[in-house]
C-alpha cells in the first residue's frame, strides 16, 4: 500500500511474520488486533510483520486498515503469485520466518497468546 517493493532477503536478520489475509475472512478480522498489538510490542526489537492481501480492491483494503488501525506494511498480491508460491489454501495463513527459514506455519486464526509465545521463542533463540 505504501508503493514499496518488499523482499524477504532484506530482513534476513529479523524475525518476520508473513500473514496472508482477506477482508472477507472473519478469522482474519478477528486476529488483526492481536497481530497489531504484538507488532507494536516487538517492532523495536526487530520484528517485521508483512500482511499480504489476497488481491482485493485497494479501497476495500484501505478501509480495513483504517478500521483496525494497522501500522505494519500491507502488501498486495493481485495475481496471487505469492500465495501460490507459499501454497496457501486457507485464510488466514501465517508464516513465522527467522534467518530466511520458515520456522512455524499457522493455518487458521491465531490467539494472541499463541502469537506472543511464537514471537518470543523466535526472538530469544
Image: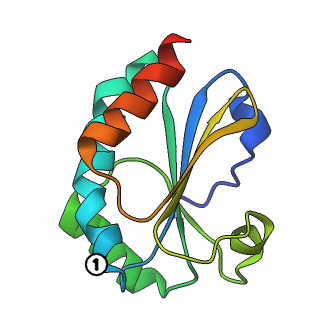
Question: Which quadrant: the C terminus?
Answer: top right
Position of 27 with respect to 9 (left or right) is left
- CA neighbours of label 1 inside 10 A, class few (<14), some (14 to 19), many (20+): few
Q: Quadrant of residue 112?
A: top left
Describe the element under mark 1 as helix, strand or loop.
helix
Looking at the image, is 56 positioned above or below residue 87?
A: below
Q: Position of residue 59 (x, y in %)?
A: 39, 84
> As drawn, which residue projects farthest toward the top?
124
Residue 12, position in %: x, y?
Answer: 73, 27
Say which of 119 and 49 sits in front.
119
The colouring scheme, among rainbow, by chain, secondary structure or one colour, is rainbow
Q: Residue at x 33, y 47 (%)?
A: 35
> How many marks overall?
1
Q: Nearer the viewer, residue 25 or 89?
A: 89
Q: Residue at x 64, y 54 (%)?
A: 4
Residue depicted at x 43% and y 65%: 108
Residue closer to the observer: 112 or 23: 112
- Check disc 1 and report the residue beneath it: 26
Q: Position of residue 43 (x, y in %)?
A: 41, 27
Name the residue rendered at 65%, 74% in the picture: 77
Percent coordinates x, y for residue 90 in the rendering: 54, 76
Left or right of 84, for residue 104: left
Amino acid at each position: 500500500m505504501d508503493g514499496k517493493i518488499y523482499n524477504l532477503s532484506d530482513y534476513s536478520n529479523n524475525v518476520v511474520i508473513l500473514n496472508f489475509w482477506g477482508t472477507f475472512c472473519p478469522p482474519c478480522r478477528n486476529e488483526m488486533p492481536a497481530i497489531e498489538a504484538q507488532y507494536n510490542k516487538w517492532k523495536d526489537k526487530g520484528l517485521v510483520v508483512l500482511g499480504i492481501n489476497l488481491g482485493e480492491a485497494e479501497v476495500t483494503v484501505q478501509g480495513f486498515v483504517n478500521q483496525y488501525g494497522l501500522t505494519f506494511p500491507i502488501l498486495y498480491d493481485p495475481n496471487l503469485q505469492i500465495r501460490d508460491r507459499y501454497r496457501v489454501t486457507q485464510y488466514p495463513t501465517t508464516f513465522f520466518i527467522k534467518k530466511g527459514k520458515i520456522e512455524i506455519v499457522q493455518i487458521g486464526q491465531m490467539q494472541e497468546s499463541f502469537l506472543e509465545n511464537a514471537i518470543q521463542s523466535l526472538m530469544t533463540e
